[in-house]
């Protein structure tokens, strides 16, 4: 191989590498693996909610640091501390369940439209009532590849209690 | 220029074109233009809601054909007809406003976390009360390039009316 040929091949290799480097896609595609990863986080979160109720662990697993939780009949909450305080002050409940209805995504962004149900209990764990409703969660893929919620909103299917003024 | 040189340059051009062709991203990136397009649809929808209240026009502009609206204290509604019926049966209101708080997207998927406010009126248009709250909308870019909502959920900031049983 002569010197010129070697230089030309070198140039071709360099250009090919340059093309590959400049062609890295903006973000990974949303795959069935991502759906499974999200479903797995949900399973872990439910396990905490239905056993230890260790809300510090729950919020670190489920939410990004600056996540926004939008509960009904209250102000928006931003950040893990605010969300943890909200969960800790929630009326006692058990049997929390989440059902995923529509899940999709694009790149590092995904959403879950789902349904929830839970039983409200007294201090002895006796069921005093129940609630069921729907939610939309916005998920993001973090740099370490894990998925976490950055926006979360829910509301109840149940009718409003009759207003006191209506009696 | 000798023949060999011309062939080498030809090969380089061909490889460059090949690299470019194989690097087309999976979908369009979410840009400031997309944000503006979404904001523009919202402005048009608000204009309808605050003037004609032509809900058939509103739902065709704002929602995909099989969009899901998740109102508080009621069941999920799927499809433009169900959403239109809901809007038509809503207590009379005026002065609807939407504020966009967080807007982002990836490819053909986008979300808006925002705030709403409105005044409830009687049949004469006299203000009888007000509501304010928050929403998350999921938007999709259709094949014609327009953006529409495919999932929409909201809830009120205002506290629940005191339960009748609590008196």
Image (cartoon, coloured by chain):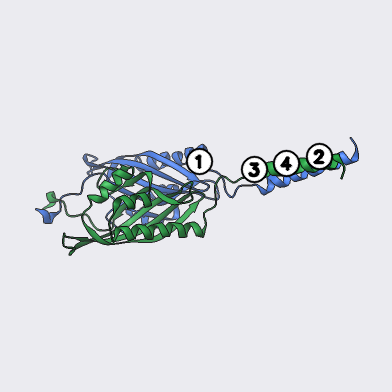
Chain colours: A green, B blue
- The answer to which of A149 and B160 lies nearer the viewer is A149
Marks 1, 2: nearer the viewer: 2
**Is A25 above or below relative to A126?**
above
**Is B147 above or below relative to B2?**
below
Q: Which SS class for mark 2?
A: helix
Q: At 90% from the left edge and 37% from the top edge, which residue is drawn?
A: B2
Q: Give a yes or no on whether discs 3 and 4 share a subunit.
A: yes
- The answer to which of B25 and B160 lies nearer the viewer is B25
Residue B40 in sight: yes
According to the image, label 4 marks what residue?
A: A15
Marks 4, 2: nearer the viewer: 2
Work out whether mark 2 precedes mark 3 in sequence or the reverse, and give the earlier one.
2
According to the image, label 1 marks what residue?
A: B34
- Dots 4 and 1: beta carbons under 8 Å? no
According to the image, label 2 marks what residue?
A: A7
According to the image, label 3 marks what residue?
A: A21
Work out whether mark 4 precedes mark 2 in sequence or the reverse, and give the earlier one.
2
- The answer to which of B44 and A61 lies nearer the viewer is A61
Q: Which SS class for mark 4?
A: helix
Report the chain holding disc 1.
Answer: B
Q: Mark 3 and mark 4: span between their CA atoms?
A: 10 Å
Q: Position of residue B47 (x, y in %)?
A: 38, 39
Q: Which SS class for mark 1?
A: helix
Q: Position of residue B106 (x, y in %)?
A: 50, 46
Work out whether mark 3 precedes mark 4 in sequence or the reverse, and give the earlier one.
4
For label 3, count other residues whose C-alpha is less than 10 Å away and answer few (under 14), some (14-19) or many (20+).
Answer: few
Marks 4, 1: nearer the viewer: 4
Quadrant location of residue A23? top right
Report the chain holding disc 3.
Answer: A
Q: Give a yes or no on whether discs 4 and 2 share a subunit.
A: yes
């Amino acid at each position: 191989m002569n010197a010129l040929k070697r230089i030309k091949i070198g140039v071709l290799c360099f250009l090919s590498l340059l093309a590959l480097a400049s062609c890295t896609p903006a973000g990974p595609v949303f795959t069935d693996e991502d759906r499974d990863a999200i479903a797995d986080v949900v399973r872990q979160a439910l396990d905490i909610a239905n056993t230890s109720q260790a809300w510090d662990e729950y919020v670190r697993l489920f939410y990004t640091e600056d996540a926004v939780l939008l509960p009904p009949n209250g102000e928006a909450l931003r950040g893990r501390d605010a969300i943890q305080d909200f969960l800790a002050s929630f009326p006692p409940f058990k049997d929390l369940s989440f059902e995923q209805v529509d899940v999709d995504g694009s790149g590092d962004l995904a959403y879950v439209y789902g349904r929830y149900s839970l039983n409200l209990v007294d201090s002895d764990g006796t069921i005093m009532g129940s609630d069921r409703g729907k939610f939309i969660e916005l998920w993001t893929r973090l740099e370490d590849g894990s998925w976490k919620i950055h926006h979360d909103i829910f509301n109840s299917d149940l009718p409003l209690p009759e207003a006191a003024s209506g009696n």
